[in-house]
Amino acid sequence: MINVRIHSTVLALFTSVGLFAQSSTRGGLTAGDPVVERLDELLESVFVRHDPFTIDTAVLNIHGFEPLDTPTYTPAEYQARLTELDQNSPFALTYNTVVRSYIDLYARRKREQTSRMLGLSQLYFPVFEDALDRHGLPTELKYLAIVESALNPAARSRAGAVGLWQFISSTGKLYGLTVSSYVDERSDLYKSTDAACRYLKDLYGVFGDWELALAAYNCGPGNVNKAIRRSGGRKDYWEAYNFLPRETRGYVPAFIAVNYIMEHAAAHNIYPVAPRFCHYELDTVQVCYAVDLNDLARLTGTTTEVLQELNPTYRRGLVPDPDEPVTLYIPHDIIGPFLAREDSLRYAYLERQHRQLAEGEQRTETRESIHIVRRGESLGLIAARNGVTVGQLKSWNGLRGDRINPGQQLRLEKTETNEGPKAQVERTEPTNVPATEGSEEAPRIEYHVVQPGDTLWDIANMYPGVTVEDLRRLNSGLNSKRLRPGDRIKLRTTG
């Protein structure tokens, strides 16, 4: 068995030399390589920025210098090390010129970022390993998050993929991740990791090959099936390599290189650099009420920037009123102030909202919705029907031209004030409920017609004096996650 593995590895090496020798640039990394981009973004992460250990290794390479004590090895040595790893892995850890280019990326050009990822792995890998074990998946898949995001939970690609596991919105929603104007669970460590495990398990079930499953994770199973057909129907990653999208071709080679560098970092004089926040410097708290991170920072003595970057799940620095407790990540040293001032935090947001409404301040809110293109529709027609411009439609959806296809999903944004949604209300006559002492108007029963994207928190804040608790009291079994457009929700107002 070992001889067969070595033979196949050597054969793959010589095959790859012929495959990539056609162009002198094939073995190198092209400009705009997504793996390189994620590594560069890592240095802007809250876990790295402003700490005293940061050095600019890119400048050293630009000026033709190498960092001190950077060992070099022969192709035979790289191949021998990968062969040893390959014998204990369900993945085909092949060595070739493309893999070598990514090993050089991690071991030489971006060695500081590699040190950072070694440090961050102590924060994230225990969570990854538990989830992979729970789903019966190979442990090596924990390295996929390094290729995807360089272990930066706030990473965002040009294609709109987000988080440690780089889910696009549609795939994230397919695997149960909430993506809304306020909450993006693609950035949630535990929920996104579980979703990634389920997605990878499904892809392996489709292709029966881990390298093809990894490629499909990056570019979608449709593109991989197309590459397989164009390669003559062979279900082999390297046979399909030239037919895959350009940005996907380096995906599996980078994964192989990460397996190598994470196991042999010390051989390249690369050692972990502790992140700005280690796991023992962070703590979690559970909240079951709306929280503005500005209030949390003010009441606990930390900064809003730190809280937002530790909690990228909450896109606007706001935790909407949840149906069940949600987790916030905070520095360990503010646990005491949090516990001491939790009652003040609980009511700070509601008090400010009520004060703003009393002062007549208009509250603007951006709602997102999805329009599915119908046959015969154009960008101009869709824009006119929704009160937006063609330019806005293109910007929101990353469109370069005017061509759209039936069935295509287009993202729409609409900005409303606190006066706008009142048009969605069905009013009834005042009830016989008597006015309270000192009030000017008797309470009245109204019905709010649920619109796409509405939450209980949104609805309560449209009406003076209405809280989420009031809505639940008047409407038994009410749950934000089961609201359907067109449903009528009873509420009592004094307006």
Image (cartoon, grey):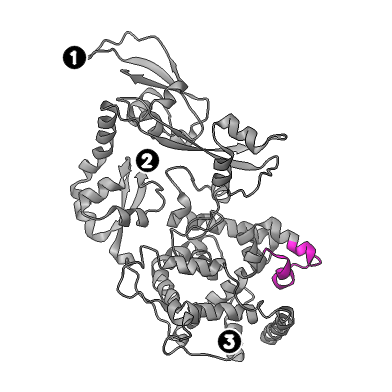
Other residues around mark 1 within 10 Å, as few (<14) / some (14–19) / many (≥20): few
Please tell me which of labels 3 and 2 falls first in the chain.
3
The reply to whether the magenta stretch includes residue 243 is yes
Q: Amino acid at mark 1?
A: Gly
Element under disc 1: loop
| Mark 3–mark 2 CB contact (< 8 Å) | no
Residue 299 spot, x, y in % from top left: 21, 48
Q: Indicate which disc residue 438 carries.
A: 1
Q: Nearer the viewer, residue 365 or 154?
A: 365
Q: Is residue 76 left or right of residue 486?
A: right
Query: Rounded to the nearest whole Å, what is the CA distance between mark 3 and mark 2?
Result: 51 Å
Query: Rounded to the nearest whole Å, what is the CA distance between mark 2 and mark 1?
Result: 33 Å
Residue 210 spot, x, y in % from top left: 64, 67
Q: Amino acid at mark 2?
A: Pro
Q: Residue at x 54, y 53 (%)?
A: 160
Identify the residue position indicated by label 2 in the image: 320
Please tell me which of labels 2 and 1 falls first in the chain.
2
Other residues around mark 3 within 10 Å, as few (<14) / some (14–19) / many (≥20): some
Res. 95 in view: no
Q: Nearer the viewer, residue 424 or 434?
A: 424
Q: Amino acid at mark 3?
A: Tyr
Q: From which residue to which does the magenta span run?
A: 227-245
Res. 460 in view: yes
Q: Indicate which disc residue 78 carries.
A: 3
Q: Is residue 487 above or below residue 209?
A: above
Q: Is residue 454 above or below residue 326?
A: above
Please tell me which of labels 1 and 3 falls first in the chain.
3
Residue 481 spot, x, y in % from top left: 47, 37
